[in-house]
Each structure stands twice: as C-alpha cells, then as structure tokens.
Image (cartoon, helix red, strand yellow):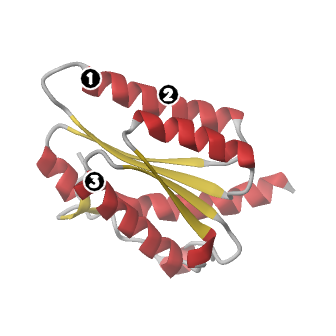
Amino acid sequence: MATTDLSQYDKEKIPNAETFRFGIVVSDWNQDITYNLLEGAVQTLTDLGAKREKIDTFFVPGSVELVYTASQLCRQKKFDALIIIGCVIRGETAHFDYVCKIVADSVTYLNTHQDTPVIFCLLTDNNKQQSIDRSGGRLGNKGIEAAVTAVRMAKLRKRISL
C-alpha cells in the first residue's frame, strides 16, 4: 500500500509536454473514482505544457474494454502516449482477479508490441475507501502520477525513435 501522497512531482524535472499528443481511455465503471483520476491526469498534462486540444479522451464501459480501445489507438500511431484509467474493487467472487490480470497482461503486451507507450492507471483496490484515497483523497491522485509518467515516456519514445 502506498503511504505517501501520489500527487507530488517536481515540474522542473519533467519534460515540457507542449509538442506531445495524448490519448486517455477511461472506464465508466466506478466513475466517481475514474473521473477524478481523469481530472487529475488532464490537469497535470496541461500543467506540464500539453495543449488541451492535444488531449483526446475516450470513454468505455469497463476496465477490460480499456485494452481494446488502447490497442486500436496504438494502431493509429497518432499519440505520443496513452493512459488507461480504470478502477476494479475486490468483491466476493474471482471476477476481480480475472479483470486485473487481463488488463495488466494486455497493457504489458501493448507496451512490448506497439510503438506507443501505454500507461497503466488501473486502481486495483480491496475496498472503495482505498480507491477514494488514491483518486484525490488522502493519498493524492494516481491520475497525476500517470500523467507525469506519460510525459516522461513520450519524451523517451521520441528520444529512442530517432
């Protein structure tokens, strides 16, 4: 479990995002959580210099659908980085385990088989309070962390693609 605020970053140590285009894929499932993560990501991307018109957002029904959409967006080759945002909260069945594994394995596959970095911002918490704590609550907002990672990976992608 994270024990510090996830929202802290040093803007001076992060590349400027002005020239980059970002795609964000957001699950509507647990939208009270995912929309807070989205807000944190978009605010951070713009704080780091990204133009709002260069941030495209795509909404999907659930977390498994994040992968399909990210895969299609990778194929378009128009984004410098993608962020997937979802929230899966453990319940009484094994569904949690399957969904988390599918998404984690699929994002790994995309990152090793496509040219666009896909940033994993899927909360996988044991209860709703843990998700609240990580989406703008006492532990900050993982959407902010995902945005910082997206900018850094977009810069790295540009550097190693030359």
| Amino acid on which the number 2 mark rests in the picture | Asp
| Amino acid on which the number 1 mark rests in the picture | His
Q: How many marks?
A: 3
Q: Position of residue 90 (x, y in %)?
A: 19, 32
* Image depth: mark 1 or mark 3 in front: 3
Determine the image quadrant of residue 21: bottom right
For image coordinates 32% across by 55% down, the residue present is: 34
Q: Which mark is residue 95?
A: 1
- Closer-to-camera residue (121/8): 121
In this view, 91 is above or below 19? above
Question: Which residue is the extreme one toward the top?
Answer: 94
**Label 2 to label 3, Cα distance in Å?**
23 Å
Q: Which residue is mark 3?
A: 31
- Closer-to-camera residue (51/2): 51
**Label 1 to label 3, Cα distance in Å?**
18 Å
Q: Which residue is mark 2?
A: 105
Residue 50 visible in image: no
Determine the image quadrant of residue 96: top left
